[in-house]
Image: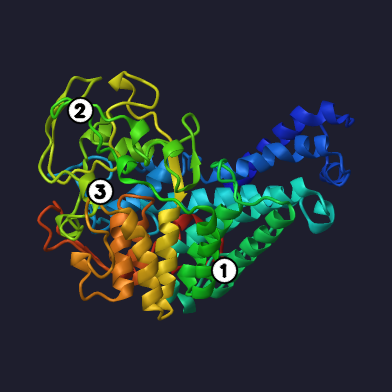
């Protein structure tokens, strides 16, 4: 675990408590001890509890949205945000084409499948540093929230649940990146060193087994679900930026999927879907609604469910304008200013051709080139090529008529379409092919163009002859295209290599084996922690 974060966390906690000391009537005000904090938390005084713990607790949900650490390397600045790191993962797959010519801009190394896994490369360590920052921050708060202190206080139960979920989220992210997939041989390999409390002087630990690491993650999530239930925090559908039951069970389903716990996947997904029954419709799916002209489009983000959470009933975790990170939109919106207007995010023709003609998701990609587009700030004219996405497209920002403000959007990290896909996969993996197809049919019906015969697993042209699992894999690629690095992590989990050799659109025709998707432990950890073993 990186010691560099400890100083920052102590400083943060001390500043929070210093600002509260006079209101808490503690003397001397600059010397609040851990014991005094625990006494205040155990006092039952809700105002003091919220004053002491509220600031720390409220950082837990935002850790999933916040920026990754700066100064942890010299790589592409996109690595400094959660969205940016996952977009880099999206470039390391089959389905996203980065531009239409040889590029040397940010993201080119990832797209060309150059080294991103070795110990010293700066494209590796950000995943490690950002995850440990969250774990250490969560543990700092959880230190104060032992069972005796929490007692029957609903606020403290909720806060403890938030800390456990944040910690579980980060441990799972470390496993996603730093070990082979559990069902692809990773079950017999090492996991991550497990720290369940914070201390600036604690000894380093060796890596636990992969099984013990996932058991630790599941235990955190199980306890979080119990605490949220006891605190009467359910499915806060109208509050997207908090850690509620849906966020916790979504993460549990994702972890259970990674470890082959199919009943747990199905159970958690069913609970979520009961509370998120509606899917996006054709009218808000992507930036396909142009109210301008063919050469001077006006595509409002307020009509794109991927950019405006208020019209997207699927969003489980997301943030509004002002809190939302916009790195992903900046690099996927073809009408956005800056780098996004150079490295166009395009779809591989091989996947595009598998999208049924009656499936309106096909409209989210330009079958022919848009042609020249004038970018409003620079006035530069650039050519937007065929297969560029409209999924994340907008010519304006939310609430503005000035094209120069393009990029003012919301963001999301979890949505119910992925819940349907996780459930269908678990059903297929468990041998219930009929049930898996029934679940997929819910998604396909919602993605059928108006006026067309409702799509099903049986009439979707490119799914003829596929197993139920293969159907899920295809529909996951289509539905989650460009989102959260899901293709990369799914490929790794399914054992699917990258092979662009027969693509007509890919500039790079390279390959990447599944074993080459696992990162080495960064050299800083190997240097500072003598107990750490390399993959």
Q: CA distance from mark 3 to mark 1?
A: 47 Å
Answer with left or right where residue 40 lies relative to residue 515.
right
- Which percent across, then down, holds residue 73? 42, 44
Label 1 Cα neighbours within 10 Å, binned few <14 / some 14-19 / many ≥20: many
Please give the residue where the numbered disc 2 appears in the rendered image.
297
- Which percent across, then down, holds residue 227? 71, 57
| Residue 207 visible, this angle | no
Query: Do residues under tags 2 and 3 come within 8 Å of each other at their CB atoms?
Result: no
Say the numbered circle drawn on residue 450: 3
Residue located 80% across and 52% down the image: 150
Q: Which quarter of the figure has residue 291?
A: top left
Q: From this view, report whether residue 77 is shown above or below residue 337.
A: below
Labels 3 and 1: the sequence-earlier one: 1
- Which percent across, then down, holds residue 50? 76, 37
Please give the residue where the numbered disc 1 appears in the rendered image.
213
Answer with left or right where residue 333 lies relative to residue 4.
left
Name the secondary structure under disc 3.
loop
- Which percent across, then down, holds residue 258? 46, 69
Answer with left or right where residue 511 lies relative to residue 78.
left
Query: Do residues under tags 3 and 1 come within 8 Å of each other at their CB atoms?
Result: no
């Amino acid at each position: 675990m990186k010691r560099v974060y400890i100083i920052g966390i102590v400083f943060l906690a001390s500043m929070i408590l210093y600002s509260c000391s006079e209101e808490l009537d503690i003397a001397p005000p600059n010397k609040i001890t851990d014991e005094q904090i625990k006494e205040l938390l155990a006092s039952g005084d809700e105002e003091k509890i919220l004053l002491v713990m509220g600031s720390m607790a409220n950082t837990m949900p935002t850790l999933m949205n916040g920026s990754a650490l700066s100064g942890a390397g010299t790589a592409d600045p996109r690595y400094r945000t959660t969205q940016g790191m996952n977009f880099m993962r999206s470039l390391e797959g089959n389905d996203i084409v980065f531009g239409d010519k040889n590029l040397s801009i940010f993201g080119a190394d990832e797209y060309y499948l150059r080294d991103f896994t070795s110990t010293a490369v700066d494209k590796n360590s950000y995943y490690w540093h950002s995850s440990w920052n969250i774990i250490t921050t969560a543990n700092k708060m959880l230190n104060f929230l032992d069972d005796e202190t929490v007692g029957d206080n609903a606020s403290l139960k909720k806060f403890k649940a938030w800390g456990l979920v944040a910690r579980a989220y980060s441990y799972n992210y470390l496993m996603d990146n730093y070990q082979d997939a559990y069902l692809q041989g990773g079950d017999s390999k090492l996991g991550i060193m497990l720290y369940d409390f914070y201390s600036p002087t604690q000894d380093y630990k060796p890596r636990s087994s992969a099984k013990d690491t996932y058991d630790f993650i599941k235990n955190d999530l199980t306890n979080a679900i119990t605490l949220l239930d006891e605190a009467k925090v359910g499915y806060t559908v109208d509050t997207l930026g908090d850690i509620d039951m849906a966020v916790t069970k979504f993460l549990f389903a994702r972890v259970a999927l990674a470890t082959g716990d199919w009943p747990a996947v199905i159970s958690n997904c069913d609970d979520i879907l009961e509370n998120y029954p509606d899917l996006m419709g054709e009218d808000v799916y992507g930036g396909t609604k142009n109210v301008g002209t063919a050469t001077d489009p006006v595509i409002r983000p307020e009509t794109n469910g991927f950019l405006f959470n208020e019209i997207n009933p699927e969003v489980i975790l997301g943030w509004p304008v002002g809190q939302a990170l916009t790195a992903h939109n900046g690099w996927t919106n073809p009408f956005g200013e800056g780098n996004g207007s150079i490295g166009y995010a395009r779809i591989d023709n091989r996947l595009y051709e598998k999208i049924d003609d009656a499936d309106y998701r096909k409209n989210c990609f330009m079958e022919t080139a848009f042609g020249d587009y004038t970018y409003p700030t620079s006035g530069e004219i650039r050519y937007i090529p065929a297969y560029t996405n409209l999924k994340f497209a907008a010519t304006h920002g939310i609430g503005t008529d000035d094209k120069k403000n393009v990029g003012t959007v919301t963001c999301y990290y979890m949505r119910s379409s992925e819940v349907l896909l996780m459930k269908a996969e678990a059903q297929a993996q468990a041998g219930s092919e009929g049930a898996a197809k029934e679940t997929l049919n819910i998604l396909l019906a919602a993605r059928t163009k108006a006026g067309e015969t409702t799509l099903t697993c049986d009439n979707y042209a490119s799914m003829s002859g596929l197993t139920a699992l293969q159907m899920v894999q295809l529909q996951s690629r289509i539905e989650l295209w460009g989102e959260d690095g899901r293709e990369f992590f799914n490929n790794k989990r399914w054992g699917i290599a990258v092979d662009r050799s027969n693509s007509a659109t890919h500039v790079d025709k390279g390959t990447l084996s599944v074993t080459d998707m696992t990162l080495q432990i960064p050299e800083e950890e190997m240097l500072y922690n003598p107990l750490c073993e390399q993959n």
